Image: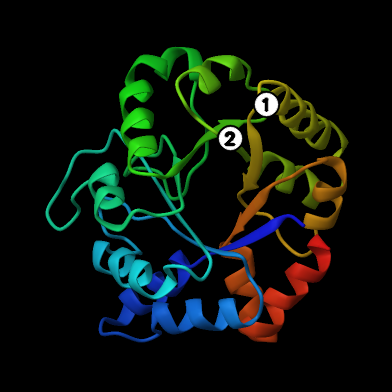
Amino acid sequence: MTLLSVNLNKIAVLRNSRGGHEPDICRAAQTCIESGCGGITVHPRPDLRHVHPDDVRALAAMLRGRVEYNIEGNPFAAARGAYPGLVALAREVRPTQVTLVPDGDGQITSDHGFDLRRDLAQLRPLVGELRELGCRVSLFVDAGSQDFELAAAIGAQRVEIYTGPYAEAFADGRPAAALAACAETARRAQQAGLAVNAGHDLSQANLGTFKAAIPGLAEVSIGHALIGEALYEGLATTVRNYLQILR
């Protein structure tokens, strides 16, 4: 079954809006695990707008040996204040997977993937170091990306397809072209020996259609929609609903 990794960034956003420790990100992770999810995702940023480095460390301590731990972020972003840098965090906590994403402070959320040919030289040593730490490495890519053989050659093991355009097209009632682009991208990546993850704006409404179109889909990382839906249905129920879709 496709693994569900729950992104807990929005739990941290809610906590940060008031200060203090509530809602507790580790308690949220525990609820997701007890409800059957196979992984937890966080995306720390240098501006500390949601998940903080101490959250990354606390989750690592509680998750070890239980479910997969996926840390996302921009490997090119320099250390700043309390943020030590993505690779430095990975060196500390040794997550199951590190998903490299080319996002910047000015972006509200991740909105594009790497240009694999252009970014190859910068990515190569970082991928190598993460692999030496024992982390699986996934690269965030757009639907329509190519050059997956280059990604495999530098040691990447997976790609995560950016599904924002698919989700937008689905909401507009015309998902066919965007879905076909994702499916073709997944096929090319798999032919190059890479496993395929997906994430961004996936929801209970659009996930089933997406999964049916992507044979061998390894993992979905879902946060914004899942936490929003959980406000109405409860976190445990919402996680179980997603798992039912993935089955």
Q: Residue at x 67, y 58 (%)?
A: 3
Residue tagged 2: 159
Is residue 50 or residue 135 the one in the foreground? Answer: 135
> Residue 185, how many percent across, how many down?
72, 27
Residue tagged 1: 189
Q: Which quadrant of the structure image shows residue 15? A: bottom left
Q: Residue furthest left?
A: 81
> Residue 45, how many percent across, how many down?
31, 52
Q: Residue at x 87, y 48 (%)?
A: 212
- Label 2: how many Cα within 10 Å (few below 14, some 14–19, many 20+): many
Is residue 22 or residue 215 the one in the foreground? Answer: 215
Q: In 3D space, how far apart are the residues under numbered discs 1 and 2 (Cα atoms)?
A: 7 Å
> Residue 204, how many percent across, how many down?
76, 65
- Report the amino acid beneath label 2: Val
- Label 1: how many Cα within 10 Å (few below 14, some 14–19, many 20+): many
Give yes or no for contact between labels 1 and 2 (Cβ–Cβ under 8 Å). Answer: yes
Q: Which quadrant of the structure image shows residue 51? A: bottom left
Name above or below for residue 143 compared with residue 27: above
Q: Secondary structure at mark 1?
A: helix
Does residue 174 appear in the picture of this structure? no
Q: Residue at x 66, y 75 (%)?
A: 36
Does residue 29 appear in the picture of this structure? yes
Q: Secondary structure at mark 2?
A: strand
Name above or below for residue 58 compared with residue 162: below
123 left or right of 236?
left
Name above or below for residue 176 compared with residue 26: above
Q: Which quadrant of the structure image shows residue 98? A: top left
- Report the amino acid beneath label 1: Ala
